[in-house]
């Protein structure tokens, strides 16, 4: 039987359990999240970006992130960057409706901010676009939050789209690749 002087102890134990148990669960969940990529996809390259590529990306206002097990280029907000297979090193063929779905990544205004393997091209409308290893870069409006790669391996606007892998490793979901942007 519980007496009146035991009630504060029981109440304190419940309060302790209500505070400590959720905090412990949150800590465990945080540790588990640190070990995952936090995005969809299944392939893993196991490679890391070279320091020169990371430095050049930072100089161009870009970042790198693990998405689907692959280290890819992202914009400053963490959104995955893509390349379009039909593009060439000097010309983007994604214009009009294509460019509204796949916004081109603008090149920095200062030429000194662009370092190899990055370069820039002039688009048909006169704006400049950043390239990586000879491939014009784009974002995808279907990516709603950082770390997503919903545009990877999509066939749209006359060609395949692939996330811009830093190491040149294969993009998830198959396809032939070459260094730079997967799938080329």
Image: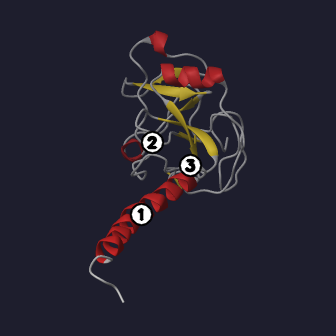
What residue appears at the point 34 percent right and 85 percent down from the top-left corner?
A: 2
Secondary element at tag 1: helix
Q: Earlier in the sequence, mark 2 or mark 3?
A: 3
Q: Is residue 113 above or below residue 66?
A: above
Q: The N terminus is located in which quarter? A: bottom left
Count of labels shown? 3
Instruction: Identify the residue under disc 1.
Output: 22
Q: Looking at this rendering, what residue extends furthest in the top direction? A: 112
Where residue 51 sits: x, y (%)?
A: 64, 22
Instruction: Identify the residue under disc 2.
Output: 79
Q: Nearer the viewer, residue 15 or 82?
A: 15
Disc 1 packing (10 Å; few <14; some 14–19; many ≥20): few
Disc 3 packing (10 Å; few <14; some 14–19; many ≥20): few
Q: What is the C-alpha distance between the residues marked 1 and 3?
A: 18 Å
Instruction: Identify the residue under disc 3.
Output: 34
The circle on residue 150 is none
Report the coloring of the rendering: secondary structure
């Amino acid at each position: 039987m519980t007496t009146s002087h035991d009630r504060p102890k029981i109440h304190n134990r419940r309060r302790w359990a209500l505070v400590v148990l959720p905090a412990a669960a949150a800590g465990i969940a945080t540790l588990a999240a640190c070990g995952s990529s936090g995005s969809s996809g299944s392939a893993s390259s196991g490679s890391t970006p070279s320091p020169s590529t990371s430095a050049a990306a930072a100089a161009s206002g870009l970042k790198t992130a693990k998405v689907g097990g692959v280290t890819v280029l992202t914009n400053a907000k963490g959104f995955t960057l893509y390349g379009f297979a039909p593009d060439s090193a000097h010309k983007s063929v994604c214009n009009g409706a294509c460019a509204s779905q796949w916004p081109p990544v603008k090149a920095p205004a200062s030429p000194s901010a662009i370092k190899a393997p990055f370069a820039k091209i002039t688009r048909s409308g006169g704006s400049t676009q950043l390239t990586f290893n000879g491939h014009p870069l784009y974002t995808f409006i279907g990516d709603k939050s950082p770390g997503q790669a919903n545009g990877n391996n999509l066939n749209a606007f006359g060609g395949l789209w692939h996330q811009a892998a830093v190491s040149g490793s294969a993009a998830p979901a198959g396809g032939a690749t070459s260094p730079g942007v997967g799938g080329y």
